[in-house]
């Protein structure tokens, strides 16, 4: 069975945790984080480490809203 790649997010999902897959030279790249903006065809996703990934809308091949990240284990 082949995987279906769909884009199931809109600008209404700003503030939600999403996962994305986009085309890059030589293949694909994934990003998971909070959708912080979607303006003029450019998505900005804040990853867990605080960095922001800018994703041109035309490079998206799949995206969806995902549940909140599980809590990190406490350090001892």
Image (cartoon, rainbow, N blue to C red):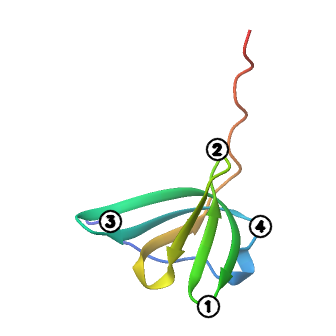
Which of discs 1 and 4 lies nearer the camera? The answer is 1
Q: Quadrant of residue 3?
A: bottom left
Tag 3 secondary structure: loop
How far apart are labels 2 and 4 at the CA level?
A: 16 Å
How far apart are labels 1 and 2 at the CA level?
A: 25 Å
Residues at discs 4 and 3 in contact (Cβ within 8 Å): no
Residue 40 badge? 1
How far across and down, in percent of the image, does residue 22 sit?
40, 69
Residue bearing mark 4: 15
How far apart are labels 1 and 4 at the CA level?
A: 17 Å
Residue bearing mark 2: 49
How far apart are labels 4 and 3 at the CA level?
A: 27 Å
Identity of the residue drawn at 27% across and 68% down: 25
Mark 1 vs mark 4: which is more N-terminal? Answer: 4
Identity of the residue drawn at 70% across and 75% down: 37
How far across and down, in percent of the image, does residue 70 sit?
69, 38
Mark 1 vs mark 3: which is more N-terminal? Answer: 3
Q: Residues within 10 Å of mark 2 (few under 14, many from 20)?
A: few
How far apart are labels 3 and 2 at the CA level?
A: 29 Å
Residue bearing mark 3: 3
């Amino acid at each position: 069975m082949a995987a279906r790649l769909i884009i199931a997010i809109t600008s209404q999902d700003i503030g939600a945790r999403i996962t994305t897959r986009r085309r890059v030279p030589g293949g694909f790249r994934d990003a998971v984080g909070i959708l912080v903006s979607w303006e003029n065809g450019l998505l900005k996703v804040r990853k867990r480490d605080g960095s922001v990934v800018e994703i041109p809308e035309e490079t998206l091949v799949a995206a969806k809203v995902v549940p909140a990240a599980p809590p990190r284990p406490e350090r001892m």
